[in-house]
Image: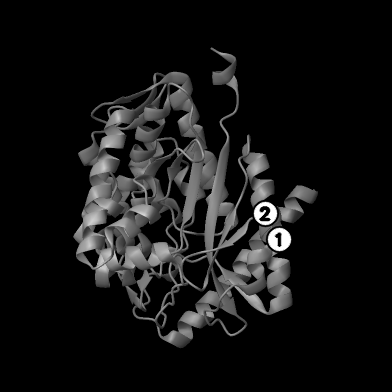
Amino acid sequence: MSVRESAPIRRSIEVEYWVVDEDGRLTEPGALADADGAEREFVEPVLEVKTPPCETAAELRTALLDRLRGVLRRADDAGKRLVPLATPVDHDEIAEREDERTRIQSRAVGERFEYVRPCAGTHVHVEQQPGHEVAQYNALVALDPALALVNSSPYFRGEPVAAGARSKCYRRLAYDGLAEQGELWPYVEDVDDWEERLRRRYAEFVEAAVDAGVDRSEVESTFDPENAVWTPVKFRAEFGTVEWRAPDTALPSQVLRLADDVVGVVERVREDGFEVDEDGRVAESGVVAPPFEDVRDYVDAAIRDGLDSSAVRAYLDRMGFDVDAYEPLTSELDGHGAVSRERARDLRLEHADRLERDVQRAQSVRSD
């Protein structure tokens, strides 16, 4: 084994949170965006918190929690809260920030862009390993059903729509007219295969924007092939990573556990190999993924039923996850029927409390 292959695989995480005031109403982040690692998102009431690349799970945990504490201190001063739910449960129209990219994307997608606005997620970046990049990408495709482990809201506009409402909105509804833009793509054969797919999707996106009245030169100067697709697994040349964009936002402890587990499987790919066979599993010979058609079925069940699906639970168990260690927030919210705007605000505040306790508990554990 080379020195490079025995070195830790660096990883980073980006988590989006809804920002609310002390009454639970959605609001813009204001000074919260000035905290270390915090950035505004394309809609007004969402704040993203990013970590730098980290070599270990412990380093990633420290980085995310330290940055969250910095944001929470500012939030306390400003009378604002962070909400770790994938959708705001129920909401009025969510305003977009003035941004050229968002304006063009909204025109290209059309009216269905309303399904993108109420979505807050988690992105996990895994450092590309020379010679293993394609296997890493394919492994993350096979792991996509693990989104079920942190589904955090079943609601869209106050109505329960799926265990993973964000994934349903984003993948199944928003990009209906540009289906390949937001869906999970099949395994790739090589990097050339990926780049050819990007070129095709980029051309489709440009044409959709032009058909919607946007000047072609404006689209092409604002977007390139890599940043014009929103598929859940992407090569990111800018960062030298493979990015998994599928999970919901959730409590910090939940997304950190998930990132650690996912990187662990990718490490097995680097050390022991990756192959596609009839049945997915992590074995002594490495990571064995099922055919893509089976992965897609597991993803559908993960979005629709979450961990209530015995097939999804069994698959994730074979792929190396301790499924019982996860308690998705969506399972606590599901089964209560429609939710009013007033109840939605209460739920946001309840989960803002939970996020703060989660961060405090992590600090206490580290102090011990």
Quarter of the image where one finds residue 173 = bottom left
Q: What amino acid is found at the position of numbered circle 1 in the picture?
A: Arg
Q: How many marks?
A: 2
Q: Is residue 8 left or right of residue 195?
A: right
Q: Is residue 4 above or below residue 58?
A: above
> In this orientation, does residue 305 appear?
no
Disc ID at residue 69: 1
**Extreme residue toward the top, this view:** 1
Q: What's the distance in space between the residues labelled 1 and 2, CA to CA?
A: 6 Å
> In this orientation, does residue 234 appear?
yes
**Front residue (pair 208, 335):** 208
The picture places residue 335, in percent across and down from the top left corner, at 36, 72
Q: Is residue 201 above or below residue 262?
A: below
Q: What amino acid is found at the position of numbered circle 2 in the picture?
A: Leu
**Front residue (pair 129, 358):** 129
Q: Is residue 322 left or right of residue 338?
A: right
